[in-house]
Image (spheres, grey):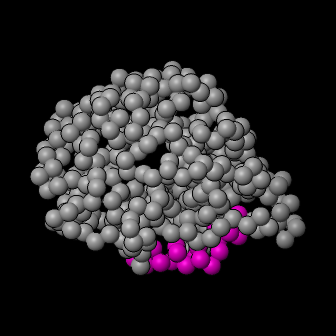
Amino acid sequence: MGHIVTEFVSMPREVYTDLMSVNNLLNLFGNRLRTLPILILYLTDGCNSRCAMCDIWRSPRRNMAPEFIDAVSGEIAALHTRWVVLSGGEAMQHPDWPNIAARLRREGAKVILLTNGLVLQKQAQDVINNVDEVVVSLDGGTAATYKAIRGVDAFQLVLDGIAAVRAGGVPVTTRTTVQQANFREIPQIIDAAKSVDATLISFLSIDVANPYAFGPRFADGLAIPVINAHEPPAGALSLEEVAALSAIYEDVFVRYQNDFERGLIAESPAKLRQMVRYFQAVDGESSFPPVRCNAPHTSMVIEVDGTIRPCYFLPQTGKWKADTSLRDQINSDAAVAMRKAYRNGERPECARCVCPLYKDARALIRL
């Protein structure tokens, strides 16, 4: 084994990188991970928004321990981690987030910052200096709707923050969670994002069917909610509203045709039409749209307390242990069993997922 390690150490970087990229692809042929291309870290569960669809802000803030961050950072190169996503809570609420981002980049990873954008303008230079890409929540096309959903009066503040970061050359994606309170403002949301030079404009259905993501939102804890056409879950659209959403999308496809064609709007018309079907399914009038995802084979979520998940929407497979390598922990018996289960269609959460991540062979080789 020693001579193999020596060969890898002395190997030209580009050759080593090619070999690790092949290992990205080999992840898909089994249920043990050779590499971890994408790592999502919940730096903190503190948040300065007061969102209607999330209750994380109600809990006392915890920050990810420095020793855990050091341990994870030290394995970035060995795990061939190419993207680290800083999330939370609100990642920018961690007092040391710029240094954490800088450390991860020194280890060879690119850093994506997921943020509500409330302090984006104030900390724009830290973002420009330490982050490769920003994803900002933009859940309204007007100040009133933004405040109603996010619980803070900060619509213009967020837009100004996006503009400041874009002026520094950092790509910014706006991410809108489409729900009952904002779906009629989709055209205004697109216009607002374009007005501050957003690099990409993305839309996602509100998740009303998963008990694991974004806190314990259901009274029965871990049971998947029963679909009831007479009482759609909070945030979901009624059947009349689903019909209105469909009409809005068809108008958007025509009005913003050039933006779809040049890739400014991330989702294709076909994918946005699937969102209509999702809400129909929530109302009991359709089956859920098919989901294609291999996130548990390409990424891992680690929460502020060290809880390890295969993705945002599946239950934990363990907790970080100081005396065990991250490689071993993401390949624990529970993690391997979870990958096998979702791959075999045995996880009902996956059928209702609003945010699947699929990396094909070409994408994995490029990572």
Q: Position of residue 288 (x, y in %)?
A: 26, 65
Q: Height in image: 297 above or below 41?
A: below
Q: Height in image: 315 above or below 264?
A: below
- Quadrant in the rendering for residue 106: top right
Q: Position of residue 85 (x, y in %)?
A: 57, 47
Q: Height in image: 103 above or below 189?
A: below
Question: As drawn, is 203 to the left or to the right of 101?
Answer: left
Look at 19% across and 43% down and name the residue there: 249
Residue 16 or residue 251, whichever sits in front: 251
Look at 57% across and 46% down and name the residue there: 46
Look at 45% across and 52% down and name the residue there: 55
Looking at the rendered image, the quarter that the N terminus falls into is: bottom right
Secondary structure mostly seen in the magenta stretch: helix
Which span is picked out in magenta?
326-345
Residue 29 or residue 177, whichever sits in front: 177
Q: Position of residue 144 (x, y in %)?
A: 30, 31
Question: As drawn, is 60 to the left or to the right of 161?
Answer: right
- Quadrant in the rendering for residue 97: top right
Look at 59% across and 39% down and name the residue there: 93
